[in-house]
């Protein structure tokens, strides 16, 4: 049946509903109209189009469905009761006006269900309770990273789970503890509970109440902090702000300056003012009172967390120095394929093969810039199209909320006459599952020498070229999210660059957010047909510290 084939009776009832908002339906009319909507998709589509025009709902279909869903859950439809029996002596009962609005809500819900069925093939009750919310959440952008947290208790619906987690445009409630956010613009915020904040963009946040310290970043644009009554703009700044629930702000400027503007809820604050370094003000409505500068009133940094070797060992999931724990002859090539810890199998020549990988070991050498234990002194060399595969005991799962870090050393040994001729070298995460389309997460050096990151069919390369014969320390971060986008970061450090003690604000290569639900259970080392590369000190962990630490891990004997 097409829309044109709908009964004139339905059109008449629809016009009666939309054109006579203060009118009423009889029980019989109500049941008839409800029956049309419940049994006829064309009737629902027709009703939706009229409702869209009549009520001015925004034209974007997804936004309409979100609004309808929220309305349906916030205003449950009253259960329908059987219509009373009508006789010749009984005038037809009239449905009161509120039933019309219940009818609209019911029809809206039906529309949502039908749209859901048409797009996914199932209904809401066949999905997880949070499926729609998760879908909406997955569309939000990443704007910041939770870099450090100490003794934090989070409230609300959005609760960060671990340091290193990427954060969306959402409200966050810190009931107690101290946390640091690094926005994608480079600006850092340190908040102390109880605080409620919304991360809006990489350059903007709403602070409803609580205490925070902003650390400006010289390369970032002006950061805007919006409070209930005022808007603060940093000017090369470090400042602290304590915001009360009534909107009063105590502002303490430690470095630089802060421009204060009224927002739309505070027309009494007539004009902008600038608070200079070394000044402190109490701001509310049209008042700006000078107060004592008290830096000690604020937590300006998250307290350091000095980790024990045991803690670092627990955060390190995989380690390989390509050197057995014991050598029969320290000068002879070793059986490096079985070294390390956190693996299910030895290094093999090919995927699903039992033949040992063919790389050459160098027991007395190391690319590491830190002093290693004797059992760690070794590396391997792969050349001429060689591969080495190994299975992980604990796979990297992209279908859950988790953060993974990976590090290794890489050095290109030579360069042929044609630098574009298969001279790449890399490490990649692979899956033993059969996929419809090939996927991998890859870190390394292209044939031209560029730092290269691949994920979700994205290829990110960064100039200038890396140098031949120089060791590079590659550190990567993999953000896995169950109901939000995934993302991968890679930092390449030369031998002259200091390895940061904490996650850096700047990465060499960064992918755009993408969605990945694969389980990466294999690691592959690969060099091009005319490539020659050294690999050393491979680590996979759950924290930055675990993959950059110089503490020797506990090895399998």
Image (cartoon, rainbow, N blue to C red):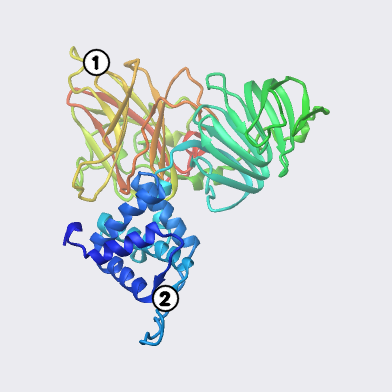
Q: From the top left corner, tell me how far across and down residue 253 is, in percent.
A: 72, 25
Residue under the image location 37 percent in, 40 percent down: 324
Which residue lies under the disc numbered 2?
Answer: 80
Q: Position of residue 48 (x, y in %)?
A: 32, 55
Q: Is residue 25 left or right of residue 309?
A: left
Q: Earlier in the sequence, mark 1 or mark 2?
A: 2
**Is disc 2 placed on a helix, strand or loop?**
loop
Q: Is residue 111 above or below residue 442?
A: below
Of the numbered discs in the image, which one, if any, rests on residue 285?
none
* Residue visible at 27% across and 65% down in the picture: 10
Observer-nearest of 368 and 523: 523
Q: Are marks 1 and 2 in contact (CB under 8 Å)?
A: no
Q: Residues within 10 Å of mark 2 (few under 14, many from 20)?
A: few
Rendered view: 4 above or below 178: below
Q: Nearer the viewer, residue 213 or 395?
A: 213
Residue 486, by quadrant, is: top left
Between 499 and 486, the one lying in front of the other is 486
* Residue 446, image x, y percentages: 27, 23
Evaluate whether residue 333 shows in this view.
no
Mark linked to residue 415? 1
* Residue at (37, 18) in percent of width and height: 470
Q: Is residue 555 left or right of residue 452?
A: right
């Amino acid at each position: 049946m097409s829309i044109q084939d709908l009964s004139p009776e339905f059109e008449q009832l629809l016009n009666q509903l939309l054109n006579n908002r203060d009118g009423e339906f009889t029980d019989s009319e109500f049941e008839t109209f409800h029956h049309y909507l419940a049994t006829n998709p064309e009737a629902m589509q027709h009703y939706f189009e009229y409702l869209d025009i009549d009520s001015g709902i925004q034209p974007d279909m997804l936004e309409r469905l979100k609004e309808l869903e929220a309305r349906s859950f916030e205003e449950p439809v009253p259960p329908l009761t059987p219509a009373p029996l009508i006789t010749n002596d009984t005038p037809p009962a009239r449905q009161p006006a509120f039933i019309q609005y219940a009818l609209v809500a019911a029809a809206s819900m039906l529309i949502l269900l039908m749209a859901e069925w048409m797009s996914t093939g199932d209904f809401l009750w066949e999905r997880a309770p949070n499926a729609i919310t998760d879908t909406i959440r997955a569309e939000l952008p990443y704007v910041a990273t939770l870099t450090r947290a100490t003794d934090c208790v989070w409230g609300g619906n959005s609760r960060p789970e671990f340091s290193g987690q990427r954060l969306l445009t959402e409200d966050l409630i810190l009931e107690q503890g101290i946390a640091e956010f690094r926005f994608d613009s480079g600006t850092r915020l340190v908040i102390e509970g109880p605080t409620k904040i919304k991360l809006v963009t990489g350059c903007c946040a709403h602070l409803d109440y609580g205490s925070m310290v902003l650390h400006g970043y010289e390369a970032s644009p002006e950061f805007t902090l919006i409070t209930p009554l005022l808007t603060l703009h940093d000017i090369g700044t470090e400042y602290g702000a304590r915001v009360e629930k009534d909107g009063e702000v105590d502002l303490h400027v430690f470095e630089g300056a802060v421009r204060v503007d009224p927002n739309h809820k505070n027309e009494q604050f007539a004009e902008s003012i600038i608070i200079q370094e070394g000044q402190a003000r109490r701001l509310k409505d049209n008042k700006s009172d000078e107060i004592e500068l008290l830096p000690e009133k604020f937590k300006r940094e998250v307290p350091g967390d000095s980790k024990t070797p045991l803690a670092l060992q627990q955060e390190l999931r995989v380690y390989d120095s390509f050197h057995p724990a014991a050598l029969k002859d320290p000068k002879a090539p070793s059986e490096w394929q079985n070294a390390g810890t956190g693996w299910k199998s030895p290094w093999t020549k090919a995927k699903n093969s039992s033949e040992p990988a063919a790389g050459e070991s160098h027991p007395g050498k190391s690319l590491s810039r830190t002093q290693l234990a004797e059992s760690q002194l070794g590396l391997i060399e792969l050349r001429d199209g060689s591969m080495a595969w190994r299975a992980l005991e604990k796979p990297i799962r992209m279908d859950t909320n988790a953060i993974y870090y990976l590090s290794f050393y890489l050095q290109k040994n030579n360069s042929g006459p044609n630098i574009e001729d298969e001279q790449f070298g890399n490490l990649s995460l692979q899956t033993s599952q059969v996929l419809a389309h090939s996927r991998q997460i890859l870190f390394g050096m292209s044939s031209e020498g560029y730092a290269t990151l691949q994920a979700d069919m994205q290829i990110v390369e960064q100039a200038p070229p890396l140098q031949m014969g120089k060791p590079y320390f590659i550190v990567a971060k993999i953000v896995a999210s169950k109901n939000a986008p995934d993302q991968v970061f890679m930092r390449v450090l030369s031998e002259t660059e200091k390895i940061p003690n904490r996650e850096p604000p700047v990465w060499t290569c960064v992918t755009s957010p993408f969605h990945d639900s694969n389980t990466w259970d294999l690691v592959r080392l690969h060099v091009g047909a005319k490539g020659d590369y050294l690999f050393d000190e491979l680590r996979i962990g759950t924290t930055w510290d675990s993959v950059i630490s110089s503490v020797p891990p506990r090895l399998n004997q």
